[in-house]
Amino acid sequence: MPPRIVNKWNRIWLLTAVGLICGVAGIYDAALSRTLTVHTGPGAWAAEAGYWLGHGTVQASVLVALWLLARMISRPLLGRAAVEGLAAFALSGVATQVIKHLIGRPRPRLWLEGVRHFGPTLADGLESFPSGHTSTTVAIGLVIALRYPRLMPVCLAGAVFVGAARILGGAHFPLDVLGGAIVGVYSGLAVKSWSDRRWPLSAGESGL
């Protein structure tokens, strides 16, 4: 079978799988959110830690610090990863905000109060889908892991932690986190692909 046809079927199966997962998650979304949300104990601490780890100001500050460090110690690849991380952060953040306000899904706390809404809005609390913390964390983690494959487990663990924290804290439904992860993956891959085409790796961009 020609590679082009194989790739086409791979994309079809991937989209089908994502669609099924989203469908199942959507059916049990509200129930899962009520079950998993915590207000005290270690879960509450994890929710708070995940909030700060996925906060835009924290993420952007860390990436800028990494870029400055790379310049100071002459590590071009580290600097490139930091810049790509910032680009992925920006792209995923903008995409998330656009989708959030087009869909206008109520956050769990409003849903439990009986608020039902779907459609474009700028109202506070109607921006649950997708999770912005998750999308930016996944996007940044992906571009860094693609430059430093050995860090993949760390980046993956960080993304899972932030996503889980948003559910535990009652800020998002599980489907919101899944949607944020998808936005993050596409944003990270888009930035990496564009960067490679625009600025191919040079011989000096190796190692840390």
Image (cartoon, rainbow, N blue to C red):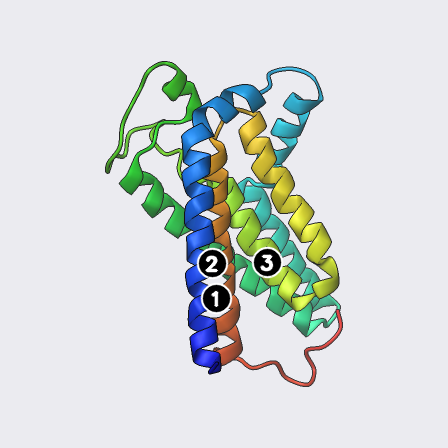
Residues marked 2 and 1 touching at CB (< 8 Å): yes
The answer for how far apart the CA atoms under marks 2 and 1 are is 6 Å
Question: Where on the picture, by quarter, is residue 91?
Answer: bottom left
Q: Is the residue marked by circle 1 packed among few (<14), some (14-19), or many (20+) residues within 10 Å? A: few
Which residue is denoted by mark 3 in the rendering? 142
Q: Is residue 89 above or below residue 53?
A: below
Q: Is residue 34 above or below residue 122?
A: above
The answer for how far apart the CA atoms under marks 2 and 3 are is 18 Å
Which residue is denoted by mark 1 in the rendering? 10
- Nearest to viewer (mark 1 / mark 3): 1
Instruction: Indicate which disc, 1 or 3, sits on the residue closer to the N terminus.
Output: 1
Q: Amino acid at mark 1?
A: Asn
Q: Amino acid at mark 3?
A: Leu
Q: Amino acid at mark 2?
A: Leu
Say whether residue 82 is left or right of residue 195. right
Which residue is denoted by mark 2 in the rendering? 14
Query: Is residue 60 something one can see in this rendering?
Result: no
Say whether residue 152 is left or right of residue 16. right
